[in-house]
Image: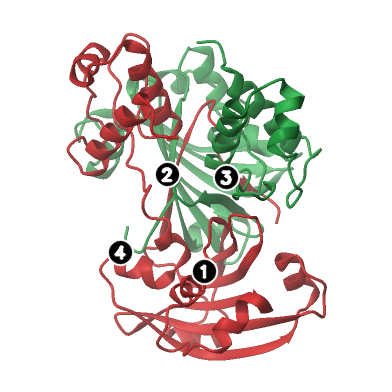
Chain colours: A red, B green
Amino acid sequence: MPPQHYQKIAQHLREAINSGRLNTGDELPSEAELCEQFGSSRGPVRQAMMLLRTEGMISTGRGRRSTVLARSDNNDFDSTISISAWLRYFGYTPGQRTLFLARKPADETTAGHLRITPGDHIVTLRRLRLADDRPFAIERSYFPVPVGRHILDADTDTTSIMETLAANDIVVDNLSRCLNAVVADEEQAELLDVRPGEPLMRIRMSASDQYGQIIFFADNLFLAENLTMSLNTVRGTPSSARLTPLD
Amino acid sequence: MPPQHYQKIAQHLREAINSGRLNTGDELPSEAELCEQFGSSRGPVRQAMMLLRTEGMISTGRGRRSTVLARSDNNDFDSTISISAWLRYFGYTPGQRTLFLARKPADETTAGHLRITPGDHIVTLRRLRLADDRPFAIERSYFPVPVGRHILDADTDTTSIMETLAANDIVVDNLSRCLNAVVADEEQAELLDVRPGEPLMRIRMSASDQYGQIIFFADNLFLAENLTMSLNTVRGTPSSARLTPLD
């Protein structure tokens, strides 16, 4: 489907916000001004505003100017699934040191995450991740064999896993993440070159393709200093973010 | 605007998923089946599927059945802004003990979060939060005076702040949250009845009304054991979730 008029208006406003031409707290032009700017009637302008409201980018109040709440990260999906892409996005040089790579039977928990039968073979990868040559995260990834066989063939010290998979037409379409706070045990602390007891952000990720097939499950530990997950929620709008007191 | 046909189809599917009639990994009916079920042409059915895909609830693959990825929490906004509502939602009895409540000038950081001038008066509330009578979180909330004066009048040991504000027609419409992992210092550990060094999830929240006016800023510390933030991201779809290596 070609984009409808309201989608073009929304995209224009999104770019104004993401580029910083409009900042958090700034007022948007009035409906009348937007109608004139886009040669549009009120309907599409209002639909565009509702869409941006749904995305958590703007507030909309009756009879008042809408204001900018937050930027979106529409084009940034690859940096949510690849630590390398994510570090590069923020100006760091990514690196990695492979600790463990093997094909072996899945235990019950991992099999559950990969939706396979316990005992089925999987590929397990454990790496120390570096940012500007400094230890930053411990990566523990698990792949079903049809995906993981490409990892076994790769040089995991020099290669981005996501790029290896993409070269084999395996493309992540959906990522589900669970975050919680833990502290480093002795082994983790030694790898990360910190003292035991340092706070870590544990991020478990489950990635699937556009058909809902699981591509990998990962259970990663990040040094928590300055690592922040930010998110925006709007009343009356579906949100996948969910804080639960129990695992 | 009354809901359009595609929105009704989307809502029907959302309810099927949220009620558990369709579970994660299940296939959705085919496009043809949905067209027949809703007496609809392909257009609205496809629009409904795109909407659910955008919400991270389903996968959509060309020529294959869509599968269920995750539930949504459309109707759960109040439990994201109120610790009391959130605990009740999960079957706990919420409680609180006020540690500090005062009207005083804002320091520079807090003024920035509330978008006021440093030195302007604010209302500061510090409470120990309980779940089934056990310490669970330290709440540190900051309100601009037009909002906070209602808090000064309330019994903060027995009252839900969000209910007090709602009774005064102050309604949160947008919530922005930042999560990171820290460890308890001695004072925090004593309040929470744990040992210093226990992992905590620090959640900073900024809440605004539908006009973008700030209602409160909070800097809360939760016992991290079992506290999990889960979220879902879909390629090509705007997401407000953003993991940053620097604060």
Residue under label 4: A89
**Residue A80 occupies which quadrant of the picture?**
bottom left
Going by the numbered disc 4, the residue's amino acid type is Tyr
Residue under label 2: B240
Disc assigned to residue B56 = 3
* Residue B181 visible, this orientation: yes
Q: Earlier in the sequence, mark 2 or mark 3?
A: 3
Going by the numbered disc 3, the residue's amino acid type is Gly
In the shown orientation, is residue A61 left or right of residue B4?
A: left
- Where residue B215 appears, as percent x and y from the top left, is 39, 26
Query: Circle 4 — which element?
Result: helix
Q: Label 1 neighbourhood size at 10 Å, few (<14), some (14-19), many (20+)?
A: few
Q: Chain of mark 1?
A: A
Going by the numbered disc 1, the residue's amino acid type is Asp
- Mark 4 and mark 3 in contact? Answer it, CB < 8 Å: no
- Mark 2 and mark 3 in contact? Answer it, CB < 8 Å: no
Residue under label 1: A169
In the shown orientation, is residue B102 left or right of residue A81?
A: left
* Quadrant where the C terminus of chain B is found in the figure: bottom left
Mark 1 to mark 3: distance in Å? 22 Å
- Where residue A157 appears, as percent x and y from the top left, is 44, 89
